[in-house]
Image (cartoon, rainbow, N blue to C red):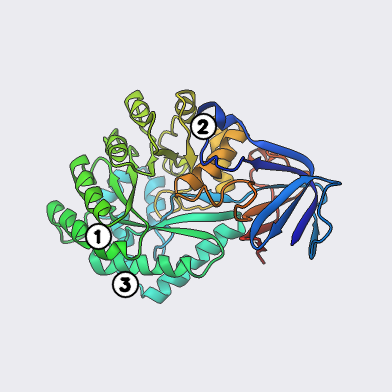
Amino acid sequence: MILIKNIGEIVGIVPEGVLRKQGTEMAETGVLKDAWLAIEDGLINGFGVMGTEPVDATEVIDAQGGMVMPAFCDSHTHIVYAGSRDGEFLDKINGLSYEEIAARGGGILNSSDLLHETSEDELYLQSMERVREMMDKGTGALEIKSGYGLNPADELKMLRVIRRIKESVPAVVKVTFLGAHAIGRGYTHEAYVQTVVDMMPQAAELADFVDVFCDEGFFTVEDTDRILTAGAACGLKPKIHANELAVSGGVQVGVKHGALSVDHLERTTDVEIEALRGSSTMPTMLPGSSFFLGIPFGRAKEFIRAGLGIALASDYNPGSSPSGDMRFVMALGCIRMRLTPVQALNAVTLNSAYAMGLSDITGSITPGKRADLLLTHPGWTLTKLPYLYQTPFLRKVFLGGRALG
């Protein structure tokens, strides 16, 4: 048993059986001061106030007043890609929009071309650098999408790389088939949609989820309905890209199919909020993309006032959000979306775990869950975390009960 003692405060305590926070619950989290926490067999064994700690620990860590919180959960990433798109960064500086870059053959298609020329082993090595960076910054669970292959051979190559990552790291990894990310080169729109549908049985052998970029200039509601139906027939649960570029109908088709999450939501109306009421779908906002592209931030506070929960994720990708720093995502949630630190904490831990179907095993301080934990240096509080958003704060990262490094 590992015992962490003299913890200044534990934050993110959630009762057993609570899988997501919604509405007013978003402003609530359990806090315990002057505490200890025990880890056994990779799981949270228990916690309490100092003076009641177990005496049979085989390893004792003195937190020296540091804070303990759940590791971050990142439910939306595109971190398996080749090379870089820094040339497009200059295009953005010079005034081109995301849509204009895509129309010129850049964007997702540029990443597709680079990935096609990169071997599977090299793609794995490049992607693992990003995964290690994310874990070192405190991410303990993440979802990784395909979507830069855009033909059967390269999409399956991506899915194999993601599965290899899943088997190589102590973080929990979920795999998403995003064949419908853009129309692959050399295909008509209709021919490519059919190709994605035809790939589904092979993709389902490697993936947990299916995703579609249901947005203006990419895939229609009708395309999305068809692809999700094919995915469901192969046992793949939907996750949807929706309403990044326009009010697309993606939220509604996602709810119709029981999507685990609908992601982006930079451009939504009250109609989307109503569509999500009473559903099991988690609205997921990606403030890193809003920050990098200069597009609107999601209406997080309005969703919460309407009784909904929200998750926040990084959207780590080479074109529109080249960062997997979930502490910065949390800070953007507070600074630009006006979430309180507690609301932001719930959005980057429990609710983001829910958006991956993982909130029963990680995402909170709950006995029996994986010991995916962050131990800070002394003196840190939850409010300081997004406030001092560039100051180093991590002392140790525990994933599955083991300290990294």
User: Percent x, y for residue 243?
Assistant: 33, 37
Q: Quadrant of the N terminus?
A: bottom right
In the shown orientation, is residue 316 left or right of residue 380? left
What type is the residue that disc 3 sits on? Answer: Glu
In the shown orientation, is residue 205 left or right of residue 221? right
The disc label shown at residue 200, or none: 1
Q: Nearer the viewer, mark 2 or mark 3?
A: 2
User: Do labels 2 and 1 touch, CB within 8 Å?
Assistant: no
Label 2, label 3: how many angstroms apart (C-alpha)? 39 Å
Disc 1 secondary structure class? helix
Disc 2 secondary structure class? loop
Q: Nearer the viewer, mark 3 or mark 1?
A: 1
Q: Earlier in the sequence, mark 3 or mark 1?
A: 3
Residue that appears at 30% across and 61% down: 204
Disc 3 secondary structure class? loop
Relative to residue 100, is residue 252 depicted above or below?
above
Residue that appears at 69% across and 54% down: 45
What type is the residue that disc 2 sits on? Answer: Met
Q: From the image, tell me which residue sits under label 3.
A: 117
Q: How many marks?
A: 3
Q: Earlier in the sequence, mark 2 or mark 3?
A: 3
Q: Nearer the viewer, mark 2 or mark 1?
A: 1
User: Percent x, y for residue 25?
Assistant: 56, 30
Relative to residue 119, is residue 144 depicted above or below?
above
Label 3, label 1: how many angstroms apart (C-alpha)? 24 Å
Q: From the image, tell me which residue sits under label 2.
A: 337
| Of residues 194 and 185, the one drawn nearer to the viewer in this rendering | 194
In the shown orientation, is residue 277 left or right of residue 401? left
- Near mark 1 (Cα within 10 A), the count class, few <14, some 14-19 or many ≥20, is many
Q: Earlier in the sequence, mark 2 or mark 1?
A: 1
Residue that appears at 35% across and 39% down: 244
What type is the residue that disc 1 sits on? Answer: Met
